[in-house]
Image (cartoon, rainbow, N blue to C red):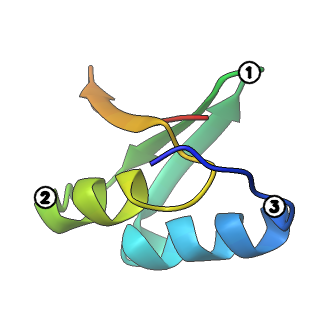
Amino acid sequence: MSGKVRDYSKLAKDILEAVVGEENVIGATRCATRLRLVLKRSNSKAKEKVASMPGVITVVENSDQFQVVR
């Protein structure tokens, strides 16, 4: 669900909450279009929840990465 997002701090907090918190994140990188998270434990509900957030185009899980496309 794309849509405009102005509060990136809130979006970041919402993404962390959806992936079951900061303690579940091993590493994070970003580029112009993606946020890549390496997670300790994958959560199928997190993918759906994050994909529905304003400002997120889709979520791709690839090579142990949880990639948020914006």
Residue occupying the far left of the picture: 44
Q: Residue at x 81, y 61 (%)?
A: 8
Residue 31, numbered circle: 1
Q: Residues within 10 Å of mark 3 (few under 14, many from 20)?
A: few
Q: Is residue 31 visible from the viewing direction of this image? A: yes
User: Callout 3: helix, strand or loop?
Assistant: helix
Mark 1 or mark 2: name the one nearer the start of the chain. 1
Under mark 3, the amino acid is Tyr
Q: Position of residue 28 (x, y in %)?
A: 61, 41
Q: Is residue 14 above or below residue 27?
A: below
Under mark 2, the amino acid is Ser
Under mark 1, the amino acid is Cys
Q: Position of residue 4 (x, y in %)?
A: 73, 51
Q: Is residue 66 visible from the viewing direction of this image? A: no
Q: In front here: 43 or 24?
A: 43
Q: Position of residue 56 (x, y in %)?
A: 54, 45
Q: Is residue 19 above or below residue 39?
A: below
Residue beneath label 3, please? 8
Mark 1 or mark 3: name the one nearer the start of the chain. 3
Q: Is residue 18 above or below residue 55?
A: below
- What is the CA distance from the residue labelled 1 to the residue labelled 2? 24 Å
Residue 44, numbered circle: 2
Q: On the rendered structure, is 69 left or right of 32?
A: left
